[in-house]
């Protein structure tokens, strides 16, 4: 039915008004941004206050519009930049870390400790202040010159616990049978569907991971708090502690309120009693351009972020959901960096548990092509396992933190058999097929013997003919060596380095230094970091997340994600399991680690 003139006029008027409103909003934001670009005034002898709390994504795309509206960037990358700037900024004489409960992983904690240690080489102090804290928060705090806790605070350094969730019992009740094939004794990711408790292999891996992290936690506390390892273990066994008790056992330096900690800094920095401590907030200091401090200049090095699960198609950096790594986006970024003659080296920052084996292979191929023209270095964040290791294995060098979770060289696939569930619902199915194996992925039937043999052959080829040989080539090992290190086994970064799966310890800064060395760039010269793929604007991410012109699809996706984020954590995890089952139903081979093992 044709649209009436009245409705057309109304729509035009509304559109014009909306456009004017957006232009006005943009103008205001640009004005605010211009004011901020003039830079905040940083007084001499200032103290930079940084927060470590809440969620900490590896990287959040820079967006001037979002910044002008006051959006915070709580990413690890942003935190490390502020510390790095403060080190060379003569106006900043100390850092005060406000540490609260954080979802930062153990690899991120190592990287923050590295940044604190590097800052302290300037002779400037770092003080930590805590209200509450657990293992990781205190682990970070121990890298500081002094650790303070509020009188009402509590320290929960009572050791590590790993949790693994299993949904097989729920599937049995629903009449759903997970028919899964996996390559690798330790490929435990599908165990959440197929088992009701840990297998011996999974328990072996988790115990190994806990031993590694716990040993490092104990040793770092012993080293920084001037104790021996046995003393620290005894202290941990008697936790938790009130602030006063934490001081008595030597875990912290003193019990003070926040203003009293600031007074301690005044004394340290030579302030007079009647002088006010000059505080610089992180939101203000973020406006100080690295270039103004002679950072981020010189030859170009591309930094390509691969954060989240790996899949086919486009990456997702929307503000409505979890980040993901899309093969199309990654390949395009790698090709851009490869073909740009001004870019001298490529650093790929991976924080991913893996995902689609097909997508991982596409990215691997693009890295192979890029490596033929210029050095490619991988920096591993919290996790770079399974598909995350697949896309790392052929880099010229692999850099990881001791607590990075990596390895998990293995593959699994299968399908959920829904017969019992459909019978329970009263749903019946009939199939009309052409072709002997046309019904291989029928939801209501298990694999026949012949289908099972063919499907297992596909999975075996993906592991033995693709994954393992590519790791062997990239790491200069034999296929037999890689297979013995593979089998789905998860390794911590320290364990992976011992076995030749990782080259050196360090974070992104060290990876950039290695890339400079391989590109024959002077070690004492700065480089300009070019972030790829080029970050989309706030409006692009907000209104057109995937470059999809379908307005209805866009709105539907936004609504789904808004609902998903509002659900309790355990419910969201259940939906994530369901999504994994759906991928298997489509025949997608998955190279993903047992990422639901959470170490706290």
Image (cartoon, helix red, strand yellow):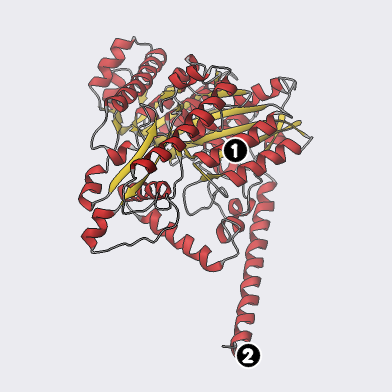
Task: From the image, tell me which residue sits under label 1.
Answer: 363
Q: In the rendered view, tell whether residue 320 sits above or below residue 376.
A: below
- For this orientation, the residue located farthest to the right is 341
Name the quadrant of the N terminus. Answer: bottom right
- For this orientation, the residue located farthest to the bottom is 5
Position in image of residue 54 (x %, y %): 42, 41
* Residue 88 left/right relative to 276: right
Q: In the rendered view, tell whether residue 503 sits above or below residue 466.
A: above
First reached walking from the N terminus: tag 1 or tag 2: 2
Q: Nearer the viewer, residue 369 or 512?
A: 369
**Residue lying at 71% horizontally and 19% vertically, measured from the top left:** 523
Task: From the image, tell me which residue sits under label 2.
Answer: 5
Position in image of residue 516 (x %, y %): 70, 23
Q: Nearer the viewer, residue 283 or 516?
A: 516
**Residue lying at 76% horizontally and 38% vertically, measured from the top left:** 340
Q: Is residue 585 visible?
A: yes
Name the quadrant of the C terminus. Answer: top left
In the rendered image, which quarter is residue 344 located in? top right
The answer for how far apart the CA atoms under marks 1 and 2 are is 52 Å
Position in image of residue 400 (x %, y %): 52, 24
- Closer to the observer: label 1 or label 2? 1
């Amino acid at each position: 039915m044709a649209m009436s003139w009245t409705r057309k006029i109304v729509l035009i008027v509304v559109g014009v008004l909306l456009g004017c409103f957006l232009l006005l909003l943009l103008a205001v934001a640009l004005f605010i941004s211009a004011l901020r670009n003039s830079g905040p005034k940083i007084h001499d002898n200032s103290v930079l206050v940084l927060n470590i709390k809440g969620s900490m994504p590896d990287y959040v795309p820079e967006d001037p519009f979002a910044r002008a509206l006051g959006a915070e960037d709580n990413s690890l990358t942003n935190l490390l930049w502020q510390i790095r700037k403060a080190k060379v900024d003569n106006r900043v004489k100390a850092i005060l870390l406000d540490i609260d409960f954080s979802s930062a992983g153990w690899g991120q904690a190592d990287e923050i400790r590295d940044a604190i240690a590097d800052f302290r080489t300037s002779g400037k102090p770092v003080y930590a202040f805590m209200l509450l804290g657990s293992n990781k928060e205190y682990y970070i705090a121990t890298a500081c010159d002094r650790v303070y806790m509020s009188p009402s605070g509590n320290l929960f350094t009572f050791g590590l616990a790993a949790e693994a969730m299993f949904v097989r019992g729920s599937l049995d009740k629903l009449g759903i049978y997970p028919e899964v094939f996996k390559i690798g004794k330790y490929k435990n990711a599908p165990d959440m569907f197929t088992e009701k408790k840990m297998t011996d292999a999974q328990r072996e891996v988790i115990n190994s991971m806990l031993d590694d992290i716990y040993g490092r936690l104990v040793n770092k506390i012993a080293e920084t708090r001037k104790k021996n390892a046995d003393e620290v273990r005894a202290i941990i066994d008697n936790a938790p502690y009130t602030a006063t008790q934490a001081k008595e056992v030597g875990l912290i330096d003193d019990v003070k309120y926040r203003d009293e900690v600031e007074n301690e800094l005044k004394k340290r920095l030579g302030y007079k009693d009647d002088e006010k401590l000059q505080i610089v907030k992180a939101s203000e200091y973020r406006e100080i351009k690295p270039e103004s401090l002679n950072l981020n200049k010189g030859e170009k090095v591309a930094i390509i972020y691969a954060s989240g699960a790996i899949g086919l198609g486009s990456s997702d950096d929307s503000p409505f959901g979890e980040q993901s790594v899309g093969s199309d986006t990654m390949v395009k970024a790698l090709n851009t960096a490869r073909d740009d003659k001004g870019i001298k080296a490529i650093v790929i920052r991976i924080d991913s548990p893996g995902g689609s084996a097909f997508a991982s292979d596409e990215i691997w191929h693009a890295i192979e092509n890029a490596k033929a023209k210029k050095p490619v270095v991988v920096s591993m964040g919290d996790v770079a396992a399974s598909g995350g290791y697949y896309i790392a294995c052929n880099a010229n060098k692999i850099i990881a933190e001791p607590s990075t979770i990596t390895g998990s060289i293995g593959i699994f696939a299968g399908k959920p058999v829904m017969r019992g569930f459909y019978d329970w619902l009263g749903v019946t199915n009939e199939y009309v097929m052409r072709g002997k194996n046309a019904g291989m992925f029928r939801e209501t039937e298990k694999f026949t013997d012949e289908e099972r043999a063919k499907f297992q052959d596909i999975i075996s080829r993906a592991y033995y003919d693709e994954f393992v040989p590519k790791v062997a080539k990239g790491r200069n090992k034999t296929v037999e060596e890689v297979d013995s290190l593979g089998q789905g086994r998860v390794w911590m970064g320290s364990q992976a380095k011992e076995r030749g799966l990782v080259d050196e310890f360090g974070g992104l800064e060290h990876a950039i230094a290695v890339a400079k060395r391989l590109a024959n760039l002077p070690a004492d010269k700065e480089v300009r970091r070019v972030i790829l793929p080029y970050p989309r604007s706030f409006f692009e991410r907000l209104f057109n997340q995937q470059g999809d012109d379908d307005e209805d699809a866009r709105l539907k996706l936004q609504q789904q994600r808004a609902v998903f984020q509002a659900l309790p954590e355990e419910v969201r995890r259940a939906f994530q399991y369901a999504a994994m089952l759906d991928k298997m139903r489509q025949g997608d081979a998955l190279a993903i680690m047992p990422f639901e093992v959470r170490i706290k």
